[in-house]
Amino acid sequence: MFNHIMVPIDGSETSMTAVSKASALALAFGSRITLIHVIDNYPFIGVGADYALGQNEYLAAATTSANAALARGVAALAAEGLHSDQRVIDGHVVHEGIVDTANAIGADLIVMGSHGRSGIEKLLLGSVTQRVLQDAHMPVLVVKT
């Protein structure tokens, strides 16, 4: 039913639950899995000139964090006997990076976590999951913890 499952992960427990759900689906359907992590390559727009970290330091730290999150996902899938592809995606708008990558790799299902933000936090931070649901042209399985 699903040939290629893509799982965006950020290292959170919610995203690891999504990896677990994708694993079960992959085992049931014989699906390929691709894990991705989207790095906002320039998060400083609208901020003053004095940064705690410069752009190069930020990108190095973000890439290290992305690789750690992906490694954790790869290990969880390997424990189930599954192989996965991994990609670090550079993109200023996270949900666009997710949808664009799903389209580019031919994924026919996105499995992702939702942090369940509400109120002012949702208003200020938005919902990547909600935006993926709006823009994706393939099924999206949303995992909540």
Image (cartoon, rainbow, N blue to C red):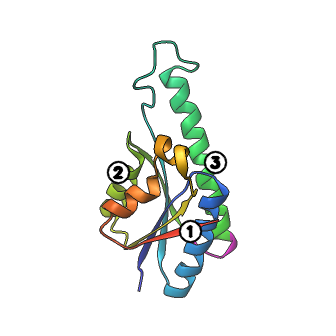
User: 59 or 85, which is in the foreground?
Assistant: 59
Identify the element where label 1 is drawn: strand
Q: Is residue 124 above or below residue 29?
A: above
Question: Gap in Å between the C-alphas at discs 3 and 1?
Answer: 21 Å
Residue that label 1 marks: 143
Circle 1 or circle 2, nearest the eye:
1
Q: Residue at 63% of width from left, 62% of height from top?
A: 16
Q: In this view, does 131 lie above or below 21?
A: above
Residue that label 3 marks: 68
Main SS category, magenta section = loop
Identify residue type, mark 1.
Answer: Val
Residue that label 2 marks: 96
Q: Is residue 11 magenta?
A: no
Q: Position of residue 123 (x, y in %)?
A: 47, 45
Identify residue type, mark 2.
Answer: Glu
Q: How crowded is mark 2: few (under 14 residues within 10 Å), some or many (20 or more)?
A: some
> Does residue 49 appear left or right of residue 73 in this picture?
left
User: Range of the magenta residues?
Assistant: 79-83
Which image quadrant for residue 133? Answer: bottom left
Q: Give the mark nearest the N terminus, 2 or 3.
A: 3
CB atoms of marks 2 and 3 within 8 Å: no
Identify residue type, mark 3.
Answer: Ala
Q: Which quadrant is the C terminus positioned in?
A: bottom right
Identify the element where label 3 is drawn: helix
Q: Residue at 58% of width from left, 56% of height from top?
A: 115
